[in-house]
Image: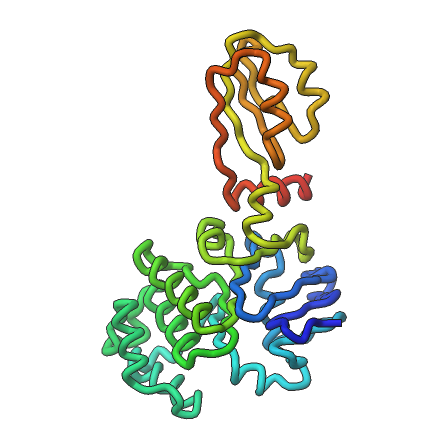
Amino acid sequence: MPSSSAAISCQGVTKSYGANLALRGIDLEVPEGEVFGFLGPNGAGKTTLIRCLLNMIRPDGGNLQVLGRCPQMDSVAVRAETGYLPGELNLDTALTVGQILTLFRRMRGGSVSPRKVNVLAERLQLDQSRPIRHLSKGNKQKVGIIQAVMHEPRLLILDEPTSGLDPLMQREVLTLVQEAKARGASVFFSSHLLSETEEVADRAAIVRAGEVVVSGETSALMRNALVRVSVTLERAIAMEVFDHLPNVWVMANRNDRDLALQVRGELDALMRALAGHGVQRFEPVPATLEDVFLSHYLRMAS
């Protein structure tokens, strides 16, 4: 059963487009008040799941709950408490930025003050006098971000939120995500940028071909990632030693003294094996979320 405290709960969600099975039994849960990263390359099923969550398309099977409601049965209430940034935002090109934001504000029942919109536009360096038709992709993205966050919803669903933005604006958007969490909101965002997910997400899931291949706390995923280690030994070591070390792989070897290794998980067993050979250099490269992604995604793809 879905958790009553979950902002989003998915159980066995499937969706097909003709012969293409886009979602193959998605199971995940986003606790309230957390930032959740949904990772995968284009075509992995990220946007399809988001559209199912907001009842833009109907899943073929499985169960969904958003803020304790079924989005198919109570979509108006779900959308009222959700801020949504689509991956591709279509705007009326005849309007200015200010006019379109006023329209979005009115659609929220006038609960958002013009001052709040102005503050957000200033933070994102968005000129409200400019016509939509003259905006770059990045500036259109800023419009989408403002309309998603301006009413301070309980849940933010953001599809590739920093797409098209320069590094300074990417930073500002991530700050908005952190501010939403600080006021108690839940955030679910899809991304293929692992660095931003690592920075702001409490939990994450990696999806491949419509299936979740791994999920959990971001810190735990990183602890279990492949770590690269460069080693220089005073005395040569027999390569057979590594045959008896689980989750240790020799990637390069020069004279049985200069080694490049990959290790999954803890390094204790490796350090004990090397101890009798005069370790002159032992340099692990800290795992990143990119290491997690590659170790799981590429392994599943092979």
Q: Quadrant of residue 275?
A: top right
Please name the residue shown 43% across and 92% down the image: 109
Please identify the quadrant where the N terminus is shown: bottom right
Residue 289 pos. (x, y %): 52, 46
Residue 138 versus residue 52 in the image, above or below: above
Please name the residue shown 54% across and 40% down the image: 291
Please identify the quadrant where the C terminus is shown: top right
Left or right side of 87 for 265? right
Residue 35 pos. (x, y %): 51, 63
Left or right side of 276 for 88? left
Near-viewer residue (13 or 15) = 13
Residue 200 versus residue 268 in the image, above or below: below
Left or right side of 102 for 5? right
Q: Quadrant of residue 118?
A: bottom left
Residue 170 versus residue 71 in the image, above or below: above
Near-viewer residue (208 or 187) = 187
Residue 212 pos. (x, y %): 67, 55
Residue 193 pos. (x, y %): 47, 52
